[in-house]
Amino acid sequence: MKLFTIFGNPVSHSKSPLIHNSVFKKYALDHRYIRTAIEDGKTIPDVMKNLNISGASVTVPHKEVAFQICDEVQGVARDIGAVNCLVRNNCGKIIGYNTDGDGFIHSIRDWKFEKILIVGAGGTAKAIVHSFINQGFKNVSIVNRSLNRLKDFENLCISVNTWDNLKIDSFDLIVNVTSAGLKDDLLPMPKEILEALFEKGKYVVDAIYHETPFLRLAKEKGLETKDGSDMLVYQGVLANSIFLERKISKELIEKEMIKIF
């Protein structure tokens, strides 16, 4: 049996086992996907070796540390500096990938927008920003409470802001990629700033895949909203394809995963 997991803290809420195991069951694969909560991302190599884990998803707060422990990094993850998908090959080497950005872009493919604001500056933010840039979007802004985490974005062709210097503008798309609302009732930014942004906004997305205070506030302002369920599925499709060495088409994987939602 091949064992797969999701590393993070917390992970008890994660639906990743449901979507990945649905594919394994459909195609009668002797694979199993579980949750593994870890405090320190640097322990990932040892945990993968000791539990004989073939592949893993990585969620908050370990995506950037997971990048550092990889023996090899593929594709856009090299530019992002964060991974959300790991494979341990037959030689025991850990190879990292990032499917977050492409999964997110696919999840909002039916919306038309130009001006984008990303709230948060972690590994998911890096993936989404890079995907927007690669897709040719010219008007991308990011905002974070502290300046320190924004340093990784300063050399990109985007507007970098803290809460204090963000100019309230007409952003078509506002995306929360912080963990605010995951296990609490917190907003990712002060309410007065969000209300001002929502007054001029159009679409709002939260990477968390349930309704959050952020999304409820946006709905109160009449904006079209989306939680992170579609992003979870589409990044999961790409990750599952990697786990299965691309032996099953992404279309067939997606067909099974979307049944969970």
Image: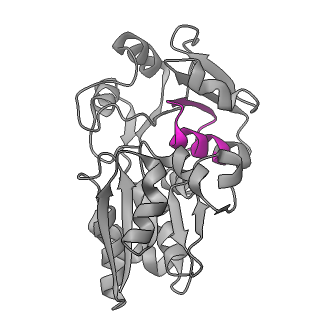
Q: Quadrant of the N terminus?
A: bottom left
The structure residue drawn at horizontal position 36% and vertical position 71%, both measured from the top left corner, is 51
* 6 sits left or right of 251 in the view: left
* 132 sits left or right of 56 in the view: right
The structure residue drawn at horizontal position 73% and vertical position 35%, both measured from the top left corner, is 138
Residues 36 and 132: in front is 36
Decide: is 255 above or below 44: below
Q: Is residue 118 magenta?
A: yes
Q: Is residue 45 magenta?
A: no
Residues 48 and 128: in front is 48
Q: Give the residues in magenta.
A: 112-131
In the rendered image, residue 203, in percent from the top left (x then y), is placed at 46, 35
* 223 sits left or right of 99 in the view: left
Determine which quarter of the picture holds residue 180. top left
In the rendered image, residue 60, in percent from the top left (x then y), is placed at 41, 44
Decide: is 226 above or below 162: below
Q: Quadrant of the C terminus?
A: bottom left
In the rendered image, residue 4, in percent from the top left (x then y), is placed at 39, 72
The structure residue drawn at horizontal position 71% and vertical position 48%, both measured from the top left corner, is 79
